[in-house]
Image: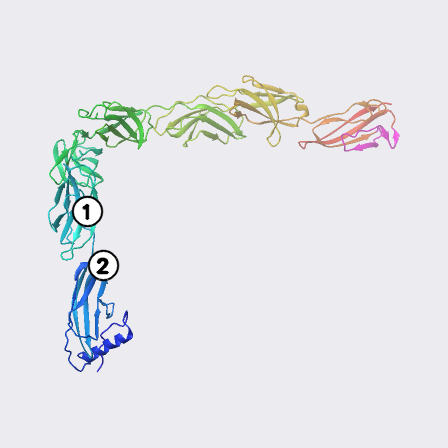
Amino acid sequence: MQKRNLFYKKNIKIDRCFLLKVLFTFWIFSPFGGWGAFAQTACFTADNTRGCVPLTVNVTDCSNTPNPTLIAYKYSQIEGFVARTTNTYTQPGRYSITQIVQVGASGDSIRRINYIEVLPTPVPIFTIKNCANQQISIDIPDLTYEQYEINWGDASPIQTTPKNSPPLTHTYASLGSFSVTITGKYVPGNCGGTTSVLVTPVTTLPKPMPSLIQTITRGTNNGKIVLNFDSDASFLYDFLVNGVAVTQNIQGTGGTIIQTFDNLNTENQVFCFEIKAKDVCGNENVSDNVFCNQILKVTAQNNQNIIDWRAYPASNIPVGAFESYTLYRNGQAYQVFTDINQVQYVDTDVQCRVNYCYELVADFNSPTLDFSVKTNQSCVQSFSTLPPPAVNSLNSTVDSDFTIRLFWEVPTIPRITSYKIDRNGEILTNETATKSIIDTDLRMTKQFCYKIQYTNECENTSAVSASTCPVFLRGNAVTQGNIQLNWTPYRNSDNSFEDYIVEKLDENGNVYAQIQIFSNIINFALDTEAKDDRQIMRYRIKTVIDNAKKIYSYSNVIQIKQKFKIFFPNAFAPEGLNATFAPKALFIKTYKMVIFNRLGEELFSTKNIDEGWNGNAKGNPAPADTYVYVVELEDTLGEIFTTQGTFLLIR
């Protein structure tokens, strides 16, 4: 026959010999492997079968077995049989205990199912609320324990109440703070969890006072108002609108309550609110009837917005409690008014086609009042029919051989949507919001004059500006090396500039010399230094509009071509002042001169214009006579020229 395993193999804390004795006894006397009856009866009792965790249990053997060989106990499923008679339970629950008794080769056992009840000790659940007259009320909805003990913290007797009891009240004889302790009790068990809370009784209920009354929606039947106030968790609250109770028994939270009132005629009616505080002991206290809403509306007029609101009903407001109205525009504080009877503001600082949203906040503060009233938000889009100012500081300058640039000053608000440009009577348009325009594909054969007007996003058009005309420059060589310059007067919309400067330009357009005119009325100049300057002279006029701000206007660039110059003497004396025969020349790039006698014989040749003939021929002085020169040359502009002549050699 297979032996029955009566024990767990783990957590056995008895010695090996003791275990063998237990196993042998159970094998003999078990129904499956024993061979005889057991005369003794197992029996034990516990001193504590119900209690709070941690629970210590002491067991006592009551089997009356004389001289037992072994008595052992099993206190839980996770532990085997042990000889000790004490066990501590650290987790709540129900536990069974098994006892075995052995005398010699005989034995018996007993198992008490769910014999021990170990109870948890949660903190009791309760609420404490203040009442007037220094009373507090305690409500214990907790059903964990059979009864509860209340220590009121003022040396009064501890009060015991069973579970499911109605709320208890207690009156304190003095003001102050008291620690109220609630202890749950198991019966039987006489133990449980405990907790404390500090209470401060009050003599009277605080008078409720909202912190904010705000009109959310303006309308005749769908108006909405919200009311914010700080609540006390001890009290219930009723709300009265114009003296009529509309919402009742709102439980305080200990924080801010936001109460909404819908379907009101906020368009035509003022609503004043009262708040009634009620405690669970039957006491009440109601707020003052001074908390009223305000309505705001805004109307857009030409170049201004009219903001209207109702004056706050101040009949019950203490003197000096009103601080100010603050008008908000697009979320920012905009204007502050200190007269409670002010009902309008005209906002002229507006731009057309811009949305403006306004709100008004009234602030009140006194020893008994501290609240704000916020109106509804009202929005409009502004408009204007006023023509904008004309373009000013309109100037112009020639940027290149084919372009003129106009630049000016103009208000940028409201935004400009288009320009109309008059160029010598021809109308040009530009659809960009800019402060400069380049006129292209021009031929600089005359002076160009411009006038501008613009249209802004308000669809209003400015007057036509005064004209601007960049300088148109002409010039010619009046004599060899003397160049006459003439130009048209510069004009701008301000009819103001400082002076003219004649600029000389190199072939790369860089200024290398200037002729200062020191006048804004002289429009001509004579360049007498051109004869030794460049074969092509380039000029432009720089108009100084504002030298401090570096504002200038430039004319067209002109080019004047000068003829090359070459001069030959008609006689020379090698022994005199003119020791050689050579020309004087300007603007010559290449050069070749050949000297012949009367017979056509070549006597001298050179390609260096600075090298002259010294009067010698074949190493000997040539006789006094008439000779012929032939010259081929190319000027700096690439023009080729051939000339010849005669001269006299004097000895």
Is 429 magenta? The answer is no
The residue at 26%/30% (across/down) is 361
Judged from this view, the residue extending furthest toward the right is 620
Is 612 magenta? The answer is yes
Q: For the stretch drawn in magenta, what is the main secondary structure?
A: loop
Q: As displayed, is residue 394 above or below residue 105?
A: above
- C-alpha span from label 1 to label 2: 22 Å
Is 619 situated left or right of 590 in this image?
right
Q: Nearer the viewer, residue 102 or 248?
A: 102
Q: Crowdedness of circle 1 by 10 Å Cα count: few (<14), some, many (20+)?
A: some
Is 295 situated left or right of 169 in this image?
right
Quadrant in the rendering for residue 95: bottom left
Mark 1 and mark 2 lie on one chain; the one further toward the N terminus is 2
In the rendered image, residue 533, in percent from the top left (x then y), is placed at 67, 26
Q: Nearer the viewer, residue 484 or 26?
A: 26
Helix, strand or loop status at disc 2: loop
The residue at 22%/59% (across/down) is 54
Q: Which residues are magenta?
A: 597-621
Mark number for residue 54? 2
Please state which amino acid type lies under the numbered disc 2. Pro
* Residue located beneath label 1 in the image: 181
In the rendered image, residue 164, in percent from the top left (x then y), is placed at 11, 50
Please state which amino acid type lies under the numbered disc 1. Thr
Quadrant in the rendering for residue 276: top left
Helix, strand or loop status at disc 1: strand
